[in-house]
Image (spheres, rainbow, N blue to C red):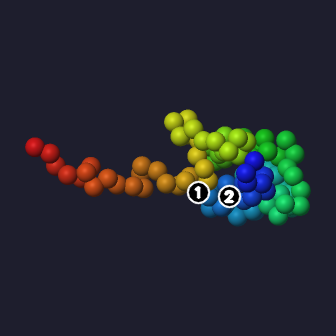
Amino acid sequence: MSTNVGRKIQLMRKSEMLTQKQMADITGVSIASLTQYEQGRNVPSLESIVKIFKHPRFRKYHDWFLFDETELKAGQVVPALAHIGQESTKSSQSEKKTG
């Protein structure tokens, strides 16, 4: 992977605007474990990774996390793009009247 696992976990968490405590609460992965992963002191177990991706907020990142790939049509995104969607952008042409 081009980005280490701990950094990817941190990017996902920050993209969802969560503290480590909030992420721990919703995923069931302890704060201590998240801290160790994010700091590169430990590698998450398969069980921890499954806990993270079982939560709906993180499913959209699984292709990026595992393969460094995204499939936008399938709802897969890179964390930096997670909160940029159609509802937050406007096309100047969409507001123009025709005819």
Q: Amino acid at mark 1?
A: Ala
> Helix or strand or loop: what does disc 2 sit on?
helix
Query: In this picture, is 10 found above or below 75?
Result: below
Q: Residue at 64% across / 42% down in the picture?
A: 69
Mark identifier at residue 22:
none
Q: Amino acid at mark 2?
A: Leu
Q: Nearer the viewer, residue 9 or 24?
A: 9
Q: Residue at 60% across / 50% down in the picture?
A: 78
Mark identifier at residue 80:
1
Residue 34 in view: no
User: Callout 2 environment at 10 Å: few (<14), some (14 to 19), or many (20+)?
Assistant: some
Query: In this picture, is 76 found above or below 87?
Result: above
In the visual, does 79 lie left or right of 46? left
| Residue 37: image location, x then y, percent | 83, 57
**Quarter the C terminus occupies:** top left
Query: Label 1, label 2: how many angstroms apart (C-alpha)?
Result: 8 Å
Quarter residue 75 falls in: top right
Q: Residue at 62% across / 57% down in the picture?
A: 16
Q: Residue at 56% across / 52% down in the picture?
A: 82
In the visual, does 2 lie left or right of 48? left
Query: In this picture, is 72 found above or below 91?
Result: above
Q: Nearer the viewer, residue 55 or 40?
A: 40
| Residue 49: image location, x then y, percent | 79, 45
- Contact, mark 1 vs mark 2 (Cβ under 8 Å): yes
| Residue 86: image location, x then y, percent | 42, 49
Mark identifier at residue 11:
2
Q: Earlier in the sequence, mark 1 or mark 2?
A: 2
